[in-house]
Image (cartoon, helix red, strand yellow):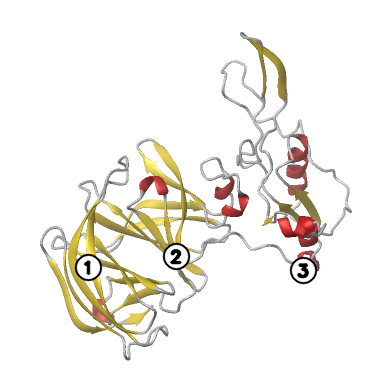
């Protein structure tokens, strides 16, 4: 409810004022299915929240209107204009908002043109699948690939899946605009990536310099990511980055998905060479190569190459180095120049196999230092 002495601030209603449910020793123990869509508004959203206090509830459908909170009506403005607005803030007990976000479905299902023509209720059909009696939809997790914020083109996040763990490399720029990379790993059990970002060195232990926060569960439905066509929510996530005293929230979106190829993944050399490596994203007709290594001052630097490639065999990859904008800077132009070449010979993408796989590197970073290797054995991690 509003704090009338401080407009714009809301206070939680004491727990003793509203009690959801009762003290009956026996209640319905089965699965509760709630169907919602963009037409679900106001009190129906509040009722959905009440059902969600029961862990056995599953919500099917699409994002609701996100408009509730005791509407004040009939406010007349000069010029013959009248308006209305919500007067209470509605959120879950843990503080997650519903206004402008709505109820986020556990399983996103929308009607299709073909289904409507066939007079089918596809949302209801999905909800009545008997598997949901015992199962729950898995939290939304990212597919391996590259993600970026279209408003900050030139930097991004790569995602690779290693068993139940996700590895992400944030390729960005330092305060001078030179390429910089940071590493994070997470299990994403609840659809949220919230793990330290580490800066690495060949000679020093990794140091946590920030936190990577990505919300793949509710993120696609929040204002910064929401789109009218909800078929485009797949893969989107809200990205939060410390900026001064606050967080910069932006929407990262898939740039490419690369999980269909066995060559996609992190590749490294022998034990003595660990601490740097290559990241590959292979699509059917091209190969994206990141080199993550270090300049003369042991600073983590990255180079990027993109080349046509259909799979297996030797390929020469021209590499480029970028200079862009820092993490906390406004986006700007990115300068690109040639940095040398990498020659890859990939025969076996099996994890841990070096036979037939090698890399030769001759590249140069911005400080003039070179990174060179000749037919070094290579293995997929």
Q: Residue furthest left?
A: 368
Read off the residue under disc 3.
131
Residue at figure coordinates x 58%, y 57% from the top left: 190
Q: Which mark is residue 145?
A: 2
* Residue 215 image position (x, y, % from top left): 52, 52
Name the quadrant containing residue 135: bottom right
Extreme residue in the top direction: 78
Point out the tag, 2 or 1, that comes first from the N-terminus: 2
The nearer-to-camera label among 3 and 1 is 3
Using the numbered discs, state the Cα–Cα distance from disc 3 to disc 1 in whole angstroms. Answer: 50 Å
Q: List x then y, in percent, for residue 219.
A: 55, 48
Residue 130's place in the image compared with 153, above or below, is: below
Query: How many residues crowd around disc 2 within 10 Å: few (fewer than 14), some, or many (20 or more)?
Result: many
User: Is residue 137 or residue 78 the one in the foreground?
Assistant: 78
- Disc nearer the start of the sequence (3/2): 3
- SS state under label 3: helix
Image height of 164 relative to 124, above or below: below
């Amino acid at each position: 409810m509003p704090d009338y002495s401080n407009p714009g601030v809301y206070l939680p209603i004491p727990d003793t004022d509203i009690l959801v449910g009762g003290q009956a020793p026996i209640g319905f123990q089965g699965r509760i299915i709630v169907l919602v869509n963009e037409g679900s508004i106001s009190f129906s959203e509040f009722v959905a929240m009440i059902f969600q206090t029961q862990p056995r509830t599953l919500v099917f459908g699409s994002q609701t209107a996100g408009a509730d909170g005791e509407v004040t009506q009939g406010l007349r403005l000069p010029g013959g204009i009248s308006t209305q607005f919500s007067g209470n803030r509605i959120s879950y007990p843990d503080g997650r908002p519903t206004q402008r976000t709505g109820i986020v479905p556990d399983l996103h299902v929308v009607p299709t043109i073909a289904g409507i023509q066939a007079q089918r209720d596809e949302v209801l059909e999905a909800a009545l699948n008997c598997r949901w009696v015992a199962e729950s939809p898995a939290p939304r997790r990212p597919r391996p690939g590259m993600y970026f914020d279209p408003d900050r083109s030139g930097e991004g996040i790569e995602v690779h899946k290693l068993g139940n763990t996700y590895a992400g490399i944030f390729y960005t720029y330092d305060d001078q605009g030179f390429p910089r990379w940071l590493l994070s790993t997470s299990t994403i059990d609840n659809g949220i990536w919230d793990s330290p970002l580490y800066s690495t060195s060949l000679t020093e232990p990794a140091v946590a310099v920030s936190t990577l926060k990505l919300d793949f569960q509710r993120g696609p439905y929040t204002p910064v990511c929401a789109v009218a066509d909800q078929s485009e929510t797949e893969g989107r996530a809200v990205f939060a980055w410390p900026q001064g005293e606050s967080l910069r929230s932006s929407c990262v979106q898939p740039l490419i998905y690369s999980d269909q190829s066995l060559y996609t993944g992190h590749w490294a050399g022998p034990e003595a060479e660990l601490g740097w490596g290559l990241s590959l994203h292979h699509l059917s007709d091209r190969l994206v190569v990141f080199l993550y290594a270090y300049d003369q001052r042991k600073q983590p630097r990255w180079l990027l190459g993109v080349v046509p490639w259909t799979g297996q065999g030797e390929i020469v990859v021209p590499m480029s180095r970028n200079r862009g904008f820092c993490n906390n800077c406004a986006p700007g132009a990115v300068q690109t120049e040639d940095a040398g070449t990498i020659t890859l010979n990939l025969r076996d993408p099996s994890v841990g196999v070096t036979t037939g796989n090698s890399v030769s590197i001759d590249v140069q970073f911005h400080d003039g230092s070179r990174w060179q290797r000749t037919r070094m054995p290579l293995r997929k991690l």
